[in-house]
Image (tube, helix red, strand yellow):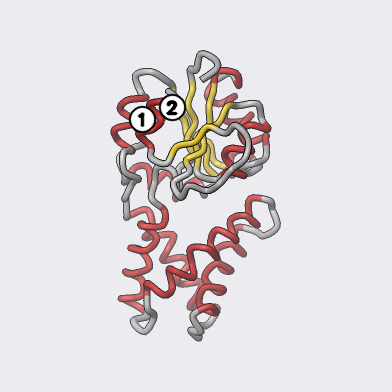
Amino acid sequence: MKQKLTDVFFDLDHTLWDFDKNSELTFNTIFKNNHPDVDPKLFIDKYVPINQDCWKLYQFDKITHEELRYNRLKHSFDAIDYSISDAQINKISDEYIRLLPDSNHLFDGTFEILEYLKPKYNLHIITNGFAEVQSRKMYNAKIESYFQTVTNSEMAGVKKPNPGIFNFALQRANAAVTSSVMIGDSFEADVQGALNAGLDAIFFNENSMEVGGDIKQINHLLELKKYL
């Protein structure tokens, strides 16, 4: 890294907390108990890209929190031709939010890299996720003690990639932009957002997506050791 680093900011979902795995487990439980005719694997295959598209709309304020929660389910059920009422969708949405943090699968190397980094840096989280849910995820996964601050979009009033959330997080952490780095799986929200706010950034590029420019990137969390 170019400068002396003091503070490391992580995204949570899809970076440390394995959202797709935990989401799959949650839907398996919900469908087994309430909608046994739904094929969980078929649903998940449709849900993953639809959820990502909905989050992109949400992060740019093109849909509301409520529309995000409804649309990602409605569009997924439509994609598998499963007839379901709005009332049932809203019930599943509530159940999903309630149960999701109970699963606590993390990406391989999460504890090892946090143990490696904690003595060397101040560690923080910046997430677009909802405050109560993210807090429960971190608590149940036993990672909350590693982080000095957790900044979410609700408290910041804006979402990544808006520079405002990074500035808000830096202020809460009492960290300088020139001595901070952001690590996340979203090139647009985490990497480009951080760079536009003046932070350095490392792309958690698990799926080896092609990116231009001189972007620092890793495919596994333990590869952070070559940068930090």
Q: For this rendering, which residue is in front, 123 or 99?
A: 123
- In which quarter of the view is residue 197 placed? top right
Instruction: Classify 10 Å Cα crowding around label 1: few (below 14), some (14-19), many (20 and above).
Output: some
Give the side of residue 172 with respect to residue 23, left or right.
right
Is 56 placed left or right of 185 in the picture?
right
Tell me whether the residue at label 1 lies in contact with that at label 2, contact meaning CB atoms closer than 8 angstroms. yes
Pick the front one: 45 or 83: 45
Seen at 36% across and 30% down, the residue is 146
* Mark 1 lies on residue: 146
Count of numbered badges drawn on the protein: 2
Percent position of residue 170, x then y? 58, 26
Residue drawn 38% across the image and 40% down it? 220
Nearest to N terminus: mark 1 or mark 2? 2
Instruction: Tell me the crowding category of disc 2: few under 14, some 14 to 19, or many 20 or more residues within 10 angstroms, Cα based.
Output: many
Residue at (52, 48) in percent of width and height:
209
Residue 221 on image: x %, y %: 38, 37
Q: Is residue 224 above or below residue 31?
A: above
Q: Position of residue 42 (x, y in %)?
A: 41, 75
Q: Mark 2 points at which residue?
A: 123
Residue extending farthest top:
4
Secondary structure category for the residue under label 2: strand
Label 1 to label 2, Cα distance in Å?
7 Å
Which of these two is toward me, 34 or 104? 104
Give the quarter of the image for residue 67: bottom right
The residue type indicated by label 1 comes to Tyr
Q: What element carries label 1?
A: helix
Percent across and percent down for residue 212 are 62, 40
Kindly identify the residue that appears in the image at 41 percent across and 66 percent down: 95
Of 221 and 64, the residue lying toward us: 221
Q: What's under tag 2, amino acid-wise?
A: Leu
